Amino acid sequence: MGSVCGSTLALMDAGVPITKPVSAAMGLIKEGDEMRILTDIQGIEDFLGDMDFKVAGTDSGITALQMDMKIPGLPLEIIAKAIEQARPARLHILEKMLQTIDKPRTETSPFAPRLLTIKIDPELIGMIIGPGGKTIKGITEETGAKIDIEDDGTVTISAVDENKAKKARNIILGMTRKLNEGDVYAGRVTRVIPIGAFVEFLPGKEGMVHISQLADYRVGKVEDEVAVGDEVIVKVREIDSKGRINLTRLGIHPEQATAAREAAAINR
C-alpha cells in the first residue's frame, strides 16, 4: 500500500503529469475462525497477515485491486467488507497525501529520467548499430544515453540528463536523415586535405568541399580559406553513386545561412 502512495507522490514531485493521484489500503489477519481486517499502509500485513489486499483508487473510484493470499480462501462477505472499509481509509490517506503535494510540479525534476522515442527506416538500423555494435556504442559513450532499437525502427533513448538524451537523438536523426541536393547546413571543418575540406554538417554526416567550391574566386591553398574547427555554411551540391556527399560554399542565400545556424544551435 505504501508503495502505491509513495509512487504517486514521487511522480507528482518529479513533475510527471498524472490525471489524478492514487492511494491504497487494506489487509487481513486470521486466527482460527476469527478474522480482522486491517487498514494499514506500513506493510505489516505483508509479513504477518494472511491477506495483502490492495484497494487502489482516486477520489472518484477504484482503479485497481490486488490480493496475495496465505490461507485457502475467504468468505465473500469478508471481501465485501474489506472493499467497503477501504473507501474511507483510502480517501483519508489521499487527503494526507494531498496536504504534502496537491498536484504535479510544473517543471520536471532534473533527477527524473528522460525518455525520447523516434522512428527510423528499419533498413538503416544496421548503420546505427555499426559493425560489432561499434557505432551505437560510440553514441552511448559520447552522450551517456541508453539506446534501444526495435526491429520496426522504433528507437528509445533514455538518460537522466535531458540534454544527453537530446544529443543522442540528434546524432541518430542526423545519421538517418534523407539528404536533398540544395539543403543548407551549418557545419564544422573536421579535416583539410590538398584538394578540399571535410565538413561534418550533421551528427555522423560528413561531406567534402572541393577547393574549387570554397570561394567564388581562385583559392591557392585550402588552408587559406578554412582550418579544422571552423564553422562553415555549406550546401549539398551532389550525392554521387557511391553515396559520397559533395558540398559547396557557393550560391547560398544569407537567409538560408541564418536558418542553418539557428537549426544547428537548436540541435546541439
Image: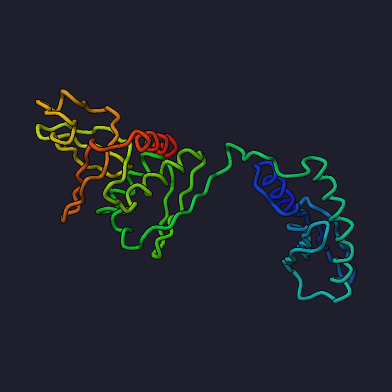
Residue drawn at x 89%, y 62% is: 85
In depth, the one of 233 and 19 nearer the eye is 233
Q: How is the image coloured?
A: rainbow
Quarter occupied by residue 30: bottom right
Of residue 130 and residue 252, the one placed in the foreground of this image is 252
Q: What residue is drawn where x is 85% and y is 61%? A: 86
User: Horizontally, is 80 left or right of 117 in the view?
Assistant: right
Say above or below: 115 vs 186. Answer: below
259 sits left or right of 115 in the view:
left
Quarter containing the C terminus:
top left
Looking at the image, which residue sits at the far top? Answer: 224
* Between 172 and 179, the one nearer to me in the picture: 179
Res 191 → quadrant: top left
Where's residue 96, x and y in %? 84, 45
What residue is rendered at 38% in x and 33% in y? 258
Image quadrant where residue 208 sits:
top left
Residue 36 horizontal/vertical position (percent): 88, 63
| Residue at screen point 85% across, 48% down | 95
x, y percentage for residue 100? 79, 40
